[in-house]
Image (cartoon, coloured by chain):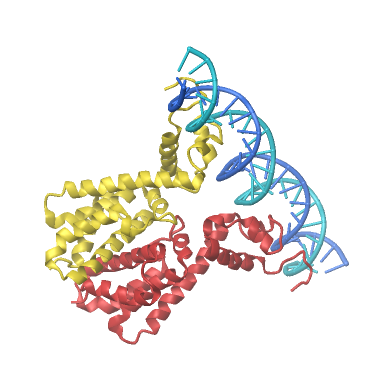
Chain colours: A red, B yellow, C cyan, D blue
Amino acid sequence: MSKDTYHHGNLKKELIVKGLEYIERYGVESLSLRKLADAAGVSCAAPYAHFRNKEELLSAIQEFITEQFMNTLSEAALYCKDRSRLLIELGTGYVLFFYENPLYYSFLFNGRCPDLESYTPFLFFRECVVTTLGNTIDEDKLEYIIIALWSMVHGLAGLITINGVVNREHISVEIEKILTSLEIRR
Amino acid sequence: MSKDTYHHGNLKKELIVKGLEYIERYGVESLSLRKLADAAGVSCAAPYAHFRNKEELLSAIQEFITEQFMNTLSEAALYCKDRSRLLIELGTGYVLFFYENPLYYSFLFNGRCPDLESYTPFLFFRECVVTTLGNTIDEDKLEYIIIALWSMVHGLAGLITINGVVNREHISVEIEKILTSLEIRR
DNA sequence: GTTAATATCTTAACAGTGTTAAGATATTAG
DNA sequence: CTAATATCTTAACACTGTTAAGATATTAAC
């Protein structure tokens, strides 16, 4: 609110957003607090009023990305009318998210990876699998299938992210073929 | 061969090995050329006679790990007498390798990840799938199943590595249940 | 074996990094 | 209005990767 240059006014949020932009373009390893502070027109020690250290800023950025990721998944599920294609749409959304932001993947799932049991994107995915396959499959098998499918989509995202073999339009088809090749439904 | 302290004699190899040990204990991000040089009893600029920069040393370490990884996979296949369990043993070896060296995973598959088409562990894995399922499955499906299985084991390794939910003895059983839950064989 | 070329290493320095301490300035609470 | 607090600056520290210039050892050529 102040026009004075001493107080920035919205530094915490700007560090997160600008930091995210920087990661998108150049990757995590070349991100520095000093460059961020410079870009925000602030001294190199200013960020420490909002974050104890660099790691804490990175965690904040991670939460920010996770929210976007979660939105992508729930939207994919929402816009899916044909319930038999729910897992395909979900998997496609999962992979596409990281396909379009390849640098997010290594940032999210490296050292800073959250516990699966409380990771909302995973919990949501689990629910979708249960509602899709719940009454067509043995109860004891279901748990393993959830892990298997999550692992597969997760691993596939990682591979595509890095190697980028498949082009964007083919990802959905690719995932459909992979999932149906497993003939999960029975 | 020389007892003089000026020439180290085996610096390149020692940097790779000591670097790997350091990564095992503390992770990649806290590895520095200077600490490595110190530990080898050598000046901070000495490594630059063997590596153009830090990245090149990291690549060398990566190749070193990949060799070990490849050995683990081929041994798992070699010691597997019951061919119907080949994929299970292979998957178990895959996951166990990173379970025992969690810091390897993020190091191997982050930014530095190799092209799958020429990545020997993947080519070996592909061969194993083909010999196991080759004549029991449609040709066009096979390619997708290969990707699906590799993605799954790869993703599972990443998740277990980070969350470490399952304990060591249960990993084999876990993978068996996951693989059989998919009922790949038909 | 002596000499020249090369590989390997040291010293010294540079710019960039995260982080902290001490103090200045603005905002908020009482 | 004043005191407490949040936010920011300046200055410094130790550490990082990297380079240039030069020293020393190893190897190749003769």
Q: Is residue B9 visible?
A: yes
Q: Quadrant of residue A140?
A: bottom left
Residue furthest bottom in the image: A81
**Residue closer to the observer: A55 or D28:** D28
Residue at image x 25%, y 63%? Answer: B149
In the rendered structure, the answer to whether residue C4 lies left or right of residue B184 reads right
User: Disc count in the image?
Assistant: 0
Q: Residue at x 34, y 63 (%)?
A: A155
Residue at (59, 54) in percent of width and height: A53
Position in image of residue B47 (x %, y %): 51, 37
| Residue at 21% over, 62% down | B179
Residue A117 visible in the shown view = no
User: Could you say where residue A139 lies in the image, as x and y percent from the top left?
Assistant: 21, 71
**Residue B60 percent location from the top left of the image:** 41, 44
**Which image quadrant is residue A142 in?**
bottom left
- Give above or below for B48 relative to A39: above
- Which quadrant is the N terminus of chain B positioned in? top left
Q: Position of residue A184 (x, y in %)?
A: 22, 73
Q: Nearer the viewer, residue B124 or A60?
A: B124
